[in-house]
Image (cartoon, rainbow, N blue to C red):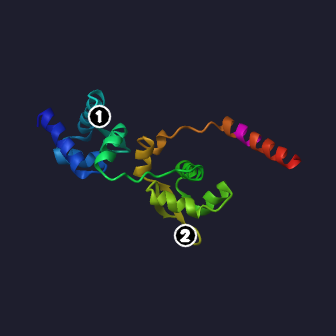
Amino acid sequence: MELKKLEAAIEAILFTMGESVEVNRIAMAVEHDVETVTKIIHNLMDKYEAEDRGIKIVELENSFQLCTKPEMYEYLIKIAKVPKKHVLTDVLLETLSIIAYKQPITRTELEKIRGVKCDHSISKLEEYDLITDVGRLDAPGRPILFGTTEEFLRQFGIKSVDDLPVINMEKVEDFKIEAEEEIQLKLNM
């Protein structure tokens, strides 16, 4: 199959599926090896960016998805009903970041870190499809383990959780010291 036909076949697969498709499934469908298909998809990604198109291909772990570029949303809103925009409050972001960095994590572990109940945050994050049940801990009561979803990767524009920013432990210690000083100031008032 010539390159143009391969590109067209890959575009058709990604467009039709409407969600992320594993690269090995695409490779099987177009009857080529994964490495070649990955290179072709990366070339398509570059073309979409360079040609200032309304769509793009995003890479999510070992999968690819055809998506609308965020800067085109204003035009979509005019033609479709206003999409539901999820508001991530500070509480939700804090809960989500703990899950993202500590996954898989139980509700109890999460609440121990946050120091408060997390029922509402967990339900909202599940409703927004940013976290999901990824299994059960092999312990008494078999608590649910939570982890992030493909939608989380998509929303935050990363390929995998390995791409999350590295936490600077020196900064964490500085924040702890600042928080303790702030607590002491409030106690002394």
Q: Residue furthest left?
A: 1
Establish if 67 lies above or below 128: above
Answer left or right for 58 relative to 126: left
Farthest-out residue, front: 78
Secondary structure at badge 2 equals loop
**Is residue 66 rendered to the left or right of residue 186?**
left
Say which quarter of the image contains residue 117. bottom right
* Left or right of 157 in this view: 15: left
**Residue 40, position in %: x, y?**
24, 34
Residue that numbered label 2 is attached to: 142
Viewed as shown, does residue 38 lie left or right of 136? left
The residue carrying mark 1 is 45
The relative height of residue 140 versus residue 101 in the rendered view (above or below) is: below
Q: Residues within 10 Å of mark 1 (few under 14, many from 20)?
A: some
Disc 2 crowd, CA 10 A, few/some/many (<14, 14-19, 20+): few
What residue do we see at 52% from left, 56% from top?
104
Q: Main secondary structure of the magenta part?
A: helix
Magenta-highlighted residues: 173-177
Residue 56: image location, x then y, percent: 30, 38
Q: Nearer the viewer, residue 26 or 115?
A: 115
The residue positioned 22% from the left and 40% from the top of the image is: 33
Could you tell me how far apart the alpha carbons at marks 1 and 2 are, in whole angstroms? 43 Å
Identified by mark 1, the residue type is Met
